[in-house]
């Protein structure tokens, strides 16, 4: 199960890698025109819309990325299946469709369906699409339906599967969403303890997208709290209004960037360069704009226990800020831009203490994350088993097409050829091969190609460690199998 979750985490790395750039674009645009969000400045509008086109599409990016990453063969048809699955469920369960199905006015549709386009639905769509692709991409239909055989069948079956999923969520989703709203209403009267609980569950629900239900209770006017609105218009109570926002600043500006630094320092030496490129951009985006998804999604599935620690620390941060009545607010997210702007508002109370708190949390995050990662060998970015490779690995920039072809041919023969190979896949650096007979595998022939190593992981499972050029070798072997 853990390996499955970690594979899911690796599948998310492709869409996650584009988020920091989007966050920075939106942050700069908001900095230029923080009141009008682009209405008063063309450049700000351009930047905000450019960044939002990606940030607002996280669910669909996850659907495509998960479907592609979790499928065998990493074929474009699997990504298309993820897109189809996501479009089916979000179209069937959008407010207009639900109103039609229930024969009611759109205004009377359960508000839960306004949030059906979320990261959880994207991940579920991707997972189901990958299952459909793995199951049906090699199915041959009768001659009169032959056009729809194989890879073309995968998106079709994904659409069919999502009909049943949509039917289930039609009844289940409002119950889950409503329960979270009721929960939020219940803890709203607990003062600083309630703020801490809110912070904890806010982070805990990020992977599902259901944090929006809690946010509606505390940030907006669902039950009269309206923490964001009252803070910015000055109609709240100094030292109280903003308590559901302030504690996020130490986490987003300091804690998570420090966690990113810890993950970089604990990455394997051969993976630090790649890890640094992601963590530097993600850390800057978190500090400057308050957008933390690039960091959080980088480890929440790879190391879920670590994410639980992060959620607990977020809750603690909100509890501390609320207890001491240190307040600041945000209109976009809890980054430097909003901190700078909100610290001048009448209801801001000792906002500089949030900086002090943030520096303390940075130390806590860095050393706690580093200790947990190394002690329990958590598979954060740059530490996964599938990312191992030797210093002797073959670099892409010195390879030629003929060399890839020659290497693939020798590996193919060493594995026993088409008669012995039942399936072949690849990850970051390794070929993952299923064979009929391990005795038919000639490891010496495979090693003669100069690959760093071979790992036999089961009676019919073998991994050939190629290096970062693995995709090109795998492509050549696939050509030989056709």
Image: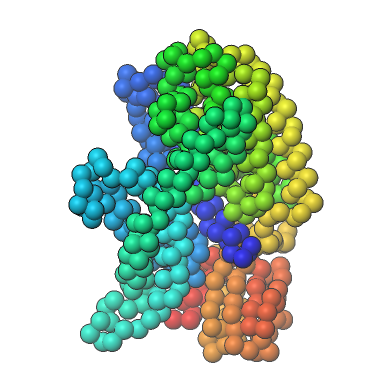
Left or right? Give the position of 175 relative to 105.
right
Give the image quarter of residue 34: top left
Q: Nearer the viewer, residue 290 or 410?
A: 290
Q: Which residue is drawn at 49% across and 49% down?
A: 208
Q: Find residue 384 and report its horizontal and vertical position in percent.
A: 67, 58
Quadrant containing the C terminus in the rendered view: bottom left
Q: Find residue 328 and report its horizontal and vertical position in percent.
A: 55, 20
Residue 261 visible to an observer of this rendering: no
Q: Nearer the viewer, residue 316 or 268?
A: 316
Q: Find residue 364 and report its horizontal and vertical position in percent.
A: 74, 34
Q: Which of 231 and 79 is in front in this view?
A: 231
Q: Nearer the viewer, residue 347 or 416?
A: 347
Scheme of image coloration: rainbow
Q: Residue at x 76, y 54 (%)?
A: 376
Left or right? Give the position of 475 relative to 434.
left
Q: Residue at x 54, y 83 (%)?
A: 422
Count up the numbered dots: 0
Q: Find residue 155 and report its horizontal and vertical position in percent.
A: 34, 67
Residue 256 visible to an observer of this rendering: yes
- In the image, residue 210 sits, relative to residue 191, either above or below, namely below
Quadrant containing the N terminus in the rendered view: bottom right
Q: Residue at x 61, y 59 (%)?
A: 6
- In the image, residue 393 sits, relative to residue 73, either above or below, namely above
Left or right? Give the position of 357 relative to 100.
right
Left or right? Give the position of 63 relative to 107.
right
- In the image, residue 375 sits, relative to residue 426, either above or below, namely above
């Amino acid at each position: 199960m853990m390996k499955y979750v970690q594979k899911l985490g690796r599948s998310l790395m492709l869409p996650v890698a584009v988020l920091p750039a989007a966050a920075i674009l939106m942050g700069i645009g908001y900095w230029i025109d923080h009141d009008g969000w682009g209405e008063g400045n063309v450049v700000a509008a351009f930047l905000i819309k450019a960044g939002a086109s990606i940030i607002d599409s996280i669910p669909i990016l996850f659907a495509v990325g998960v479907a592609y990453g979790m499928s065998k063969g990493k074929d474009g048809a699997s990504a298309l299946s993820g897109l189809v699955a996501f479009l089916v469920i979000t179209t069937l369960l959008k407010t207009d469709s639900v109103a039609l199905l229930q024969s009611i006015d759109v205004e009377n549709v359960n508000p839960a369906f306004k949030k059906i386009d979320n990261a959880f639905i994207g991940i579920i769509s991707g997972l189901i699409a990958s299952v459909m692709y793995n199951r049906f991409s090699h199915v041959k239909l009768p001659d009169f339906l032959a056009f729809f055989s194989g890879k073309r069948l995968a998106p079709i079956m994904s659409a069919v599967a999502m009909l049943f999923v949509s039917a289930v969520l039609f009844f289940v989703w409002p119950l889950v969403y409503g329960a979270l709203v009721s929960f939020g209403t219940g803890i709203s009267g607990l003062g600083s303890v309630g703020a801490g609980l809110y912070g904890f569950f806010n982070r805990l629900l990020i992977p599902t997208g259901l944090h929006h239900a809690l946010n509606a209770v505390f940030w907006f006017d669902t039950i009269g709290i309206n923490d964001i609105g009252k803070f910015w218009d000055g109609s709240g109570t100094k030292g109280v209004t903003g308590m559901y926002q302030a504690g996020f600043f130490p986490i987003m500006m300091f804690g998570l960037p420090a966690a990113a630094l810890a993950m970089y320092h604990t990455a394997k030496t051969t993976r630090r360069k790649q890890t640094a490129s992601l963590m530097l951009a993600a850390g800057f985006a978190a500090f400057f704009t308050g957008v933390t998804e690039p960091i959080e999604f980088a480890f929440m599935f790879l190391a879920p226990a670590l994410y639980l620690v992060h959620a607990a620390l977020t809750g603690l941060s909100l509890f501390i800020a609320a207890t001491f009545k240190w307040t600041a607010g945000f209109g976009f997210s809890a980054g430097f831009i909003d901190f700078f702007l909100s610290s001048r508002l009448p209801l801001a109370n000792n906002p500089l203490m949030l900086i002090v708190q943030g520096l303390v949390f940075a130390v806590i995050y860095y050393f706690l994350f580093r200790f947990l990662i190394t002690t329990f060998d958590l598979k954060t970015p740059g530490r996964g088993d599938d990312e191992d490779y030797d210093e002797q690995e073959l670099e892409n920039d010195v390879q030629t097409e003929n060399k890839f072809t020659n290497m693939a041919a020798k590996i193919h023969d060493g594995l026993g050829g088409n008669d012995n190979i039942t399936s072949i896949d690849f990850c970051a650096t390794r070929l993952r091969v299923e064979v009929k007979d391990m005795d038919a595998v000639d490891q010496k022939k495979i090693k003669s190609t100069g690959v760093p190593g071979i790992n036999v992981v089961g009676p019919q499972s073998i991994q050939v460690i190629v290096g970062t050029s693995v995709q090109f070798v795998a492509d050549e072997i696939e050509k030989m199998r056709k």
